Each structure stands twice: as structure tokens, then as C-alpha cells.
Amino acid sequence: MRHQTIPTYPTMRSRPIHRILLAVLFASLSLHATAAEPAQETPEQRDVRMAWWRDAKFGMFIHWGLYAVPAGVYQEKPVAGIGEWIMKNAKIPVETYAKYADGFNPSRFDARQWVKMAKDAGMKYIVITSKHHDGFAMFHSKASSYNIYDATPFKRDPLKELAEACKEQDMKLGFYYSQCQDWHHPGGGVMGDKHWDPAQEGSFDEYLDKIAVPQVKEILTNYGPVSVLWWDTPNSLMTPERSAKLAEVLKLQPQIIYNNRLGGGYKGDTETPEQHIPATGFPGRDWESCMTMNDTWGYKSADDKWKSTETLLRNLIDIASKGGNYLLNVGPTAEGVVPEPSIERLAEVGRWMKVNGEAVYGTKATSFGREFGKAVKGRSGYGSEVSVSSSNSWRCTTKPGKLYIHLFEWPAGKFTINQVEVKVKNAWLLADLDKKPLGFTYQDNVLSVSLPAEAPDKIASVLVLDIDGTAGQLPDYQVQSADGTLKLDASHAEISGNTVKLEDDHIGFWTDPEDSVQWPVEIRKAGTYRLSFEYSLADEASEVVVSAADGSLKVKLAPTGDWKKFETKEAGGIRIGEAGKFFLKVSPGAKPKTGVMNLRSVTLFPQ
């Protein structure tokens, strides 16, 4: 499944042009529409409603449905793509796909065991698919007999059992519902394609009124308190008028939290980046990264590309450090069993959370304002030599009076932060129950904390700093080399926007004209500087504006022919009238057709 309605912003390295255009279109529909939200509330009321979710940080996504029966195989051949999209990807006729229900008997399903697994992993809420795009309801629905109770030998309602287990174990429960796409019921939508079976033809309004709206009423009425409603994949069919019908149903659960994928201009409560972590999160918005443990959401028997516990745990920390939540997916089998690699990894994450959960739950984003770029030891512009300052070596979460430094790499003897304003009263390791104080020094905006020789945890060790007030990062100004050259790498950029993000060694996913990147720089001599860009751009020219101090330059970038093909090209000169410290900013000069560019670096040369 690809959830994203405002979609996973496509990586410029790999997405076909039509997929990129769809992404931009859907982003425009969802981000810039102005339809009224279903309920008006004050900021204070919203804070109360969102409080538990903001504190939770970690939830379990469950993709479970009829697609678990074929498990990625149709007519004895593997089907490319994610497991839950097999009906569409293989163009399986409606009647043929529906027959999978005859063999769907998840007799090993144990709701209490699932909830306990999530709870032991440190998760605070569960969101499960009540109906995915294949149209099959995983609950006893009166609106359609195409459901697990009426159409299968199972004859049980797993959502009811899960709701009871969540209540018993004090776990919040939410439901995913595919409101627009439905490949079974006549009139249901199909994302980016046409119906492939005449049985799918019909009126979308009739589908909405007779299937989607009634089923959403059922899941919001029959399963106790519902904490989250997770919509997915709207398209142009979801007009403001149609979306309003579903938004009205949300009033059945006034405290519910819903995401930004309803359609029709409803922004919802949460942004939903999928399968990636935005470099700077979504300042001013609640957000949640949803990710898989392997490559697929629904169970696919051949998918054994499991992420390591280290990756999963550091994802959680990274997301929390940017103020977001982590919704981590499991895809149970047709028997109702969560795959063993998922169970093992969740248990390992849970063991870490039992020791270090204080540094995740209820925390807010880093005080330092952005990801830290990769610092090169002794490099000009980065103060004194640094012990740790790479983008992959640590993250920070905060609570009033405390900084939690999550160390991914254990420094030799001490941890140092350059260019920081902070008043530290005490320092200790969170894994140390005795809170043995660690020595520290603070001089010339450089904080150094002495550490023991061995790390408490091989994946992430948490250093606690007890502070007065709040901490802040001073701009880490990059300065020219001896010959006047200044190279600005992507990993050092301050990134701002909804789509743009740091990918490995370059900035990508840059499709929104409001997004920008900038670097704090120190220019020691006024004058005109030639610019060069190391970038890639597929087959459409792009335009950007470079601004610094009192100078600006409009730059047209020619295509390099492929998103993976990086080239270095000069782009004219920019006049900087005075030496000093300021930001050099790159922003789109016009709305991009497919994407602004993939950017590795910008270099200034004295002219």
C-alpha cells in the first residue's frame, strides 16, 4: 500500500514523472484548500485533546486484511509491489479476489497477545486497518456483507476483540479506513488508474453514501472510545462536499484525532510523512511518520528485508527529536500471526524503552533548532576540534529543565557541543539508577561532558543534562577557506518546508515552491562570488533564487537527464556588498514542474 494522499513525497532519484506530478497535485489539494474543519475549538481545547497523543510518541500500525491470504502471489507467480495492493497490481477481477475470503480463517489470532506485544514494546496506541483499498471490512459490518464475519469461516469480529483487549490493558485504539479507494464495491475509487473490472463500475456518490459513511459510523459507534481515525489516499473524487459527509461522522467521537488524508481540503490534526523522516519535522504542526519493518505493509511471504532493531530504535529517537510520533507497522499472516522478525525487534525496542523511555515519552523537539550536520575534525568554521557533531551520531529530546542527548556513537572520553548556549546544573547517564554526576565544562559556548569508557547501550545511550531555562544552538557559521572558496554541503543545510528533506548526501523530495534551504555563512571579504551547483535534475529545467546579505541571483538550472545523474555547473555571480555573518538561502524562483532539484552542494568562488 502506498498510504499517502498527500503522498510520500517522491524521491527525485526514482519516481516516474507521472507519479511526481500526482504527488504535487495531491499536495496542492490537501495543503492549500480552505474547507472548514469539522469542529471549531480554541487552541487550549486542542491542546487538551491532543495531549495524550503528543506524549505517546510511539504507536503500532497493523495492516491486516484479505490480502494476507495471497501474500504477494497470484496464479503461482509473485506480484511486484506492496502486499496489500496485490488486487490492483495484478488486476485481479473482483469475483476472483473475493474468493480468497473462503480460505481466510485466522484461528491463531489473539487480540490480548497483540496488545501485550505492543505494550511491551513501549507503544502507547494501536491503529489497525478496518477496511483497506480492497474493500474488505475487518469487522462485522451491516453496510456490506463483504466482511470477515459474514464472508469467511472465521465468524468472529477481530476489531471487537481488539477493542476489548485494549480497554483491559489501557491501550489507545484507532482505526484506519480507506474512504476513497475501494476496488470491490461498485463506484469505489482507484488511485491513479481506471477500473479494470466492469464489476467495479458505478456511482461514487452511491458508494460513499451506502458503504463508506455507514461503515465509518459503525466503527465509531460499536467499538468503544476510538482515539484515532486514519484516512487514506483521497483523490479528486473527495470534494469538499463529499468529504464533509465523513467529517460529520467524526462528531460521534468528539475527542478523536484524525490525519490529513481525508481530502476535500480538510487538514486534519496530523501530518503523515510515509516511509521517511522529514529533516526538520513539521514546525507548528503535529506529525507522525508511518513506516514498515520490512518493505511492505500487508503480509507478503517473500519480503524478508527486515530493518535492524538499531534502525527502528534510532528512527524512533530521530522522530521524537523533531517533535513527531512514530507509527511502526506489523503485517500479520492470514493465520493471525505477527511474523517472528517483527516480534523479536519489538521486544528488543521494548527493553531499551524500559530503561530510557523517560527520554522519549512526553518530550518535545530538540532545543537546537535543526539537525546537526557532519562536522569534519579541525575544519575551518566549526570552532575547536569536535568530539561528536555528525548528523548520524546523536539526537536531542527535551523536557522542562532537561535535555536528553541520545548518543548513537560513543565519544572517546567526552561529549562536546560547539556553538551552544546552555546553563548546565548537573549531568548523568539515564541508565545509571544512582544518577552519578558526570564532570562537565562550559567555556566560549562550548559544552564538554566527561563520559566513562564504555557506553551503557550499543544502540543509543542517553546523557541527561539538568539545565536552567532552555538551551539553544548558535548559528554554526561556515567560513571561507584560505583561497576564499566556500563549499556548502547538503548535510549542513538548514531545511525548511513540507516536502524537502535530506537524503544521504543530497537534498531531495523538493516539490513545494514554498520550501527552501539555507546555510549560516561568514564572508570575510566583500565582492562578487561565482556560484556553482552540484545537482541533478531529470528532464525539466528549474529556476531558483540565491540570496545572501544584500545580494541575490536568479539561476536557471538545465536538466542533467536523470535524477541520479549529478553534475557540477557554474551559475553566474552574486554580489555581496559587505563582509560579515548572514544566511545564504536557496529558494525556488518559480513553481517546479516535477521538482526543484536534487542538491549536493553550492560553492562560492571569489571572482
Image (cartoon, helix red, strand yellow):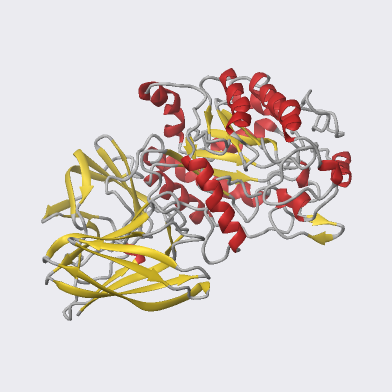
Query: How many discs mark residues in the rendered view?
Result: 0
Q: Is residue 59 left or right of residue 102?
A: left
x and y percent of residue 233 in the render?
62, 43
The answer to whether residue 200 shows anywhere in this view is yes
Quadrant in the rendering for residue 250: top right
Relative placement, left or right, of 148 versus 366 is right
Q: Picture coordinates of residue 468 (x, y %)? A: 18, 38
Q: Is residue 186 left or right of residue 582?
A: right
Considering depth in this image, is 292 or 16 the residue closer to the camera? 16
Q: Is residue 208 above or below residue 423?
A: above
Residue 161 seen anywhere in this rendered image of the structure: no
Vertical placement of residue 291 versus 271, above or below: below
Q: Is residue 603 left or right of residue 331?
A: left
Q: Name the image quarter holding residue 181.
A: top right
Residue at x 18%, y 77% (from the top left corner): 484
Residue at x 38% of width, y 21% of height: 42
Place residue 218 in its image quadrant: top right
Residue 442: percent from the left, percent from the top?
13, 52
Q: Position of residue 569 (x, y in %)?
A: 37, 78
Residue at 53% across / 67% down in the picture? 13
In front of the other: 497 or 348: 497
Q: In the image, is residue 482 above or below residue 542?
A: below
Q: Relative to 342, say whether 256 is above or below.
A: above
Q: Nearer the viewer, residue 400 or 433?
A: 400
Q: Which image quadrant: the C terminus?
A: bottom left
